Image (cartoon, coloured by chain):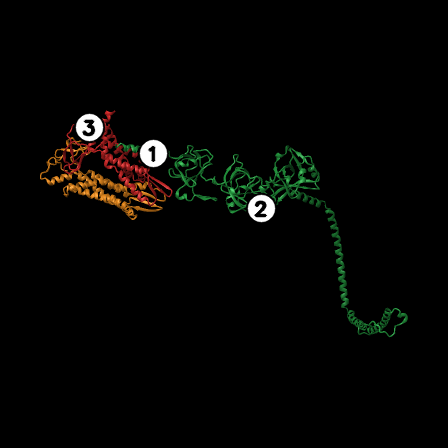
Chain colours: A green, B red, C orange
Amino acid sequence: MVWFVPLVALVLGAWLLYHNFAAQGPVAKVRFDTADGVVAGKTEVRCRSVKVGVVKRVKLAEDLRSVLMHLEFDPDAEGLLRQGTFFWVVKPRLTATELSGVDTLITGSYIELDPGPSSAEKCFEFTGSEDPPATNRNVPGLRLTLTADEAGFLSVGSPMYYRGFEVGRIEARTLGADGKKVSYRAFVRKEYSQVVTENTRFWNTSGVDISAGSEGFKVRTPSFQAMVSGGVSFGITEGEEPGKVVPDETNFTLYPDQDAALRATFRPNMRFLLLFDQSVRGLAEKATVEFRGITIGRVAKVSFNLVPTGGDSRIPVLIELDTTKMRPEAASKLQDPDSDFVKTAVNHGLRAALKTGNLLTGSMYVDLDYYPEAQTAEIGKSGEFTTLPTVSSGFVQLEAKLTAILDKIQALPIDKTMGDFASAAREAKTTIAESRKTLREIEDTAAAARTVIDGPGFRGLPDDLHRTLDKLQNLAASVGPDGAIQGDLLRTLDELRASLRAIKSATTTIDEKPNSLLFGRDSTGNPKPKAPRGEH
Amino acid sequence: MNRILARTLNAAMSWPKPQVHRGQSVCHFCDTLHEGCHLNEGMAARCARCGALLYENQAGSLVRASAFSLTALLLMVLVHIFPFLTMDAATLRRELTLFGAAGALMKDGYQLLGTSIILFTFVAPLMLAGGMLYVCLPLMSGRAAPGAVFVAKLMYRIEPWNMVEVFLLGVLVSLMKLAKVADVHFDLGFWAFTGVMLCTAAAVSGIHRDELWDRLEVARS
Amino acid sequence: MKTRFPKAAAHGLAGCHTCGKVSPVSLGRCPRCGSRLHLRNPHSIQTTLALVVAATVLYIPSHLLPIMTVTELGDVTHNTIISGMLWFWRSEAYPIAIVIFTASILIPLLKIVALCWLCAAASGLVHPSPKALGRIYWFTELLGRWSMVDIFVVGILVSIVRLGNYMTVIPGPGALAFAGVVLLTMFAAMSFDPRLLWDQLDELSSTEPPTNTPKP
């Protein structure tokens, strides 16, 4: 009958309604800070860019501080709603570390979700965030926590470097509960996770690193991106064992720079207290303690609280020494409580002194050295610490030296010297006066001599001299080569020469025939080689 | 139980004539007076002069009217739950509903047009189908619902203003226009509305006006 | 001839417009349904003509003014009924173009013309055959409502095409004018009493005026 028609309509309608409403997927309530860019009924919910639901309702939360959104999901998306599922709004983003979501300028924002771990239980109420997680949860890798004293220039998205390679990024940044420390969540990609071990150290390589310490100025610049957005480097210090590979969620300290990280390899195991009777201005905590240039420790604390009693105006400085930096035998002796190694050393003049590391910044360091001329002192005990004797140093010492010089100068017999000078000057004065007199006499003599020279008698003198000279010349000429005397001399010389020749031949003969003196020359008739005659 | 059923069927099947007046009919086209005659089921009376239909005795008219108007009402519920069309363009999704179309016009300042859409596609078919059901269902057992006269009068007054089929044609034309721009497809609302159109038409043509009024008069007396 | 076709009016009887019951017009209201009884619709031709004139007046702006404005990525296009139809034609959606043409351009025009003609015939100015008249009247009554298609299309597009900057549709004043045309012609057709036509016919074919027939 025709009543089938409404019956069919009823059944069909009921079925359609049921199918539409009951087969609807789950609804999740997510709390966001704002509903910026989200339109109820239109904004989609996506997982890995696949639509899995739609925003059904947007309303202000009761506390008027946040927005509650009802998200309706497709039925097969039920498995996505678990504890740990993360929701965020995908909007166009342009920051120093990121450019993303530009297509949402045309299509409108959407909400993206990152499902929690499959082992987690179902959950239907969430709190969403305006920003995406820096790394998708499913990307395999190592997740660590870094703790630092100051935030510095690091932000979410800053890269992590190992030997210059970018191996991860900072995911999140939170201020510690006590407000003193900053915690970072860092992510290191799986390929590089093996590199992070127990003894790895992390330091901040943000910006340009200019440090002025007792070694002088140092300027270090990292990659451009690290300069812009900050970065973290990590590595093992030389000489250290890498240790075991660390698991997820391990906590590390983030040092402000590489030097601090290197210094952190420092493991102090001995402490001494130093009392300085001078200003410690320029001595910073963590300043080095050196022994003749080798860093063996650092300044732990500078505070009046270190000494139990008051009344002492000396400044207490607590130093820590790392015995591994010393010579092994010294180290073991130091650590041995029974040995009096320290006592002996002090007796030999071991003292602590403050020296200026950097003239420009005035930073100081503690120097342990032997001072043979130091005053005798002993190690002492102040509270729980052993005290080492100190000497003043640096500028103070310079001051002392200058003072000493000045004293010396003071001690000089200047008055006497002055007196001597005065008498010498007086004597010189008289000498000069007399010299002047002598000079005058010479002048007079010279004047008289001139008059003599100018006089007539003197004129004739040159002629006389001429004659005398001529005579002398004749005399010389006769003595000279053309002179008669010389001729005579020459004749005489010739005669002498001849005589000498004769004697020479005689001696030659005698030489040849020693018996010729007795027997004369042999004239037997045999040709005998003869020495050549008179070679002149 | 059987007696009520038998009585209902009897009342539904035959056309009771009011006892008071002579069965006269007037052709509403040419005003020719006719003497009323008893019609059997399936018979129709036409004007002697102009040939226009005077009245007819349809088989199971009440039943048909009631059933179809009920169906129309049920389908109208679906019409307003599901959208007519869904359009996807550049990851934006828009859905067409009856009230959405009227509301959009009203929001843009064309309140008259918005109201007229509501009137012609929601109010009219609702009153038509609802009124038909309200009047015809009790008539099946020979009873007149309270205020049935008023409802029936209203129903027939509003009958020319029922434009469900015109709206459906409008949806088709819009679809043609949008198909180039976006990905459009019919949704459940459209098919339900088609059902409403067919069922309303079937309900109204299921029973002749004169028959309904005669039955009503008899039931009231 | 007259005796073969007795007129209810001649007998002072009128068929109720709403329920069809034949009652003496002197009752004033139909005893069955309570609607007013008229022998003829009062001032039928005048009302009809007035409405037809109003519809004609609105017809011109309804086609000149845009019925909707489409903004596509900043590019603003004003659509009139005719431009919409031409768009469909050019897009090779010929059936739709024909439908739009028939419903929005042809039908209102024909309706206006038909009503004018009917009024003329009822006033005795023209003398067409009754069958033709009947058919024309049936046509105007039935098809008039289909002209509302364009209005519905505008409403649908306005509500659905809200794609922000990509594409947006807003209605235009032409839609209001056109809705006015359709409604006015519908009212005009409803206020026209077709029985007047037959009266005219009777007047023509008879020598003596029928008694008790009130002059329209």
User: Is residue B157 at all visible to an observer of this figure?
Assistant: no
Q: Which of the two marks, 1 or 2, is nearer to us in this view?
A: 1
Left or right of A447: which side holds A60?
A: left
Residue that mark 3 sits on: B218
* Picture quadrant of residue C185: top left
Q: Mark 1 and mark 2: span between their CA atoms? A: 75 Å
The label shown at residue A17 is 1
Q: Which percent across, then down, holds residue A193?
A: 53, 41
**Label 3: few (<14), some or many (≥20) within 10 Å?**
some
Disc 1 chain ID:
A
Left or right of C3: which side holds A39?
A: right
* Picture quadrant of residue A328: top right
> Callout 2, which amino acid?
Lys
* Of the pair A135 and C157, the residue shown nearer to us: A135
Give the quarter of the figure containing the N terminus of chain B: top left
> Callout 3, which amino acid?
Val
Q: Mark 3 and mark 1: span between their CA atoms? A: 41 Å
**Label 2: few (<14), some or many (≥20) within 10 Å?**
few
Q: Which of the two marks, 3 or 1, is nearer to us in this view?
A: 1
Disc 2 chain ID:
A
The label shown at residue A218 is 2
> Callout 1, which amino acid?
Leu
**Label 1: few (<14), some or many (≥20) within 10 Å?**
some
Disc 3 chain ID:
B
